[in-house]
Image (cartoon, helix red, strand yellow):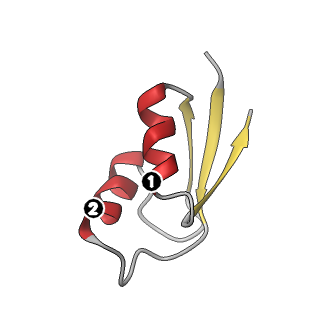
Amino acid sequence: MKKIKITQVKSVIDRPERQKKTMAALGLKKMNASVEVDATAQILGMVRKVEHLVTVTEL
C-alpha cells in the first residue's frame, strides 16, 4: 500500500463545518501539521474535498 504525507497549509477558520470535520478526521489540527497515512480510496476522497487546504506528497 502506498503511503502519502498530508500537510495542512491553510487555516480552517471561516470554512464550512464539513471541511473542518474532514480535516480533523485526517488528523490535522494545526497549521503546518503533517500526517502519514495509507493512500486508500477513502483517504484520497477526503483529501480531494479539502485539497485547497493541504499539500500531498507521495512517500
- Which residue is label 1 attached to? 49
Q: CA distance from mark 2 to mark 1?
A: 9 Å
Query: Residue 42 appears at what percent x and percent y?
Result: 41, 31
* Residue type marked 1: Lys
Q: Which residue is mark 2?
A: 18
- Judged from this view, the residue extending furthest toward the bottom is 14
Residue 50 against residue 17 in the figure, above or below: above
Number of other residues with Cα within 10 Å of mark 1, as a class: few under 14, some 14 to 19, many 20 or more:
few
> What residue occupies the far left of the structure in this picture?
17
Q: Nearer the viewer, residue 14 or 35?
A: 14
Neighbour tally class for label 2: few under 14, some 14-19, many 20 plus, Cα within 10 Å:
few
| Displayed quadrant of residue 19 | bottom left
Kindly check if marks 2 and 1 are in contact, taking CB atoms under 8 A apart as contact: yes
Q: Quadrant of residue 16?
A: bottom left
Dot 2 or dot 1: first in sequence order is 2
What is the x, y in percent for residue 49? 44, 53
Q: Which residue lies at the image location 45% right of the left edge and 40% below the top edge?
A: 45
Task: Name which residue lies at 54% across and 71% down.
Answer: 31
- Say left or right for 20 vs 6: left
State the quadrant of the N terminus. Answer: top right
Q: Residue at x 74, y 32 (%)?
A: 59
Residue 38 got which mark? none
Q: Secondary structure at mark 2?
A: helix
Q: Secondary structure at mark 1?
A: helix
Residue at the image point whose x is 41% and y is 74% from the top: 12
Image coordinates of residue 43 in percent, x first then y, are 46, 36
The amino acid pointed to by label 2 is Arg
Q: Is residue 56 left or right of residue 12?
A: right
